[in-house]
Amino acid sequence: MKIYGAAGFVAFFGILCLLIALVFFPIMFIREMHERGKDKWFFGWSYGVAWGAFFFLTSAAILLMCDRKREELFYKESLYINNDDEDILENQDVKIKTLKR
């Protein structure tokens, strides 16, 4: 459980840093373009990809926090026997147990 808390903290810290960068970059960029007197400018495709990464990272962190109370590993064993092996099992004293959950 401690690992989930640490991973959640790191994820939300990364989201916060990314959000600050995505907000302050255009503010400073617009200010600099205004000082230079340039009227025509645009953001590149990478700025849109950064916003996409922000939304995916946010959804991944939320899903991580929703799933933190579950067991990390779950094993379920099953035993399958072919019909060809029935004569072998009849000759030997074998007990087959099934697990129910």
Image: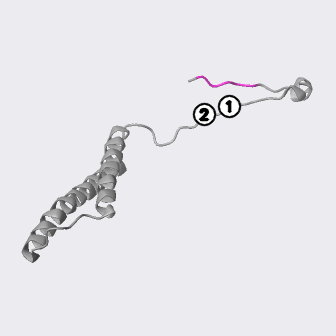
Q: Is residue 57 left or right of residue 76?
A: left
Q: Quadrant of residue 88?
A: top right
Residue 63 in the image, given as x and y percentages of width and height: 35, 41
Asked if the stretch drawn in magenta spans residue 68, the answer is no
Q: Residue at x 70, y 25 (%)?
A: 97
Q: Quadrant of residue 41?
A: bottom left
User: Which of 22/65 is in front?
Assistant: 22
User: Which of 12/79 is in front?
Assistant: 12
Q: Quadrant of residue 20?
A: bottom left
**Image height of 64 relative to 9, above or below:** above
- Tally of marks: 2
User: Which of 46/1 is in front?
Assistant: 46
Dot 1: element: loop
Q: Is residue 89 left or right of residue 23?
A: right
Say which quadrant the C terminus sits in. top right
Q: Provide the residue designation for mark 1.
A: 78
Which amino acid type is marked by label 1? Answer: Ser
Q: Residue at x 92, y 25 (%)?
A: 87
Q: Residue at x 18, y 65 (%)?
A: 25
Q: Residue at x 26, y 55 (%)?
A: 15
Report crowding for label 2: few under 14, some 14 to 19, many 20 or more residues within 10 A (C-alpha). few
Report crowding for label 1: few under 14, some 14 to 19, many 20 or more residues within 10 A (C-alpha). few
Which amino acid type is marked by label 2? Answer: Lys
Dot 2: element: loop
Residue 96 in the image, given as x and y percentages of width and height: 75, 25
Q: Provide the residue designation for mark 2.
A: 76
Say which quadrant the N terminus sits in. top left
Residue 49 in the image, given as x and y percentages of width and height: 34, 58
For the residues marked 1 and 2, what is the alpha-carbon distance in whole angstroms?
A: 7 Å
Is the magenta region chiefly helix, strand or loop?
A: loop
Label 2 near label 1: C-beta < 8 Å?
Answer: yes
Q: Which residues are magenta?
A: 96-100
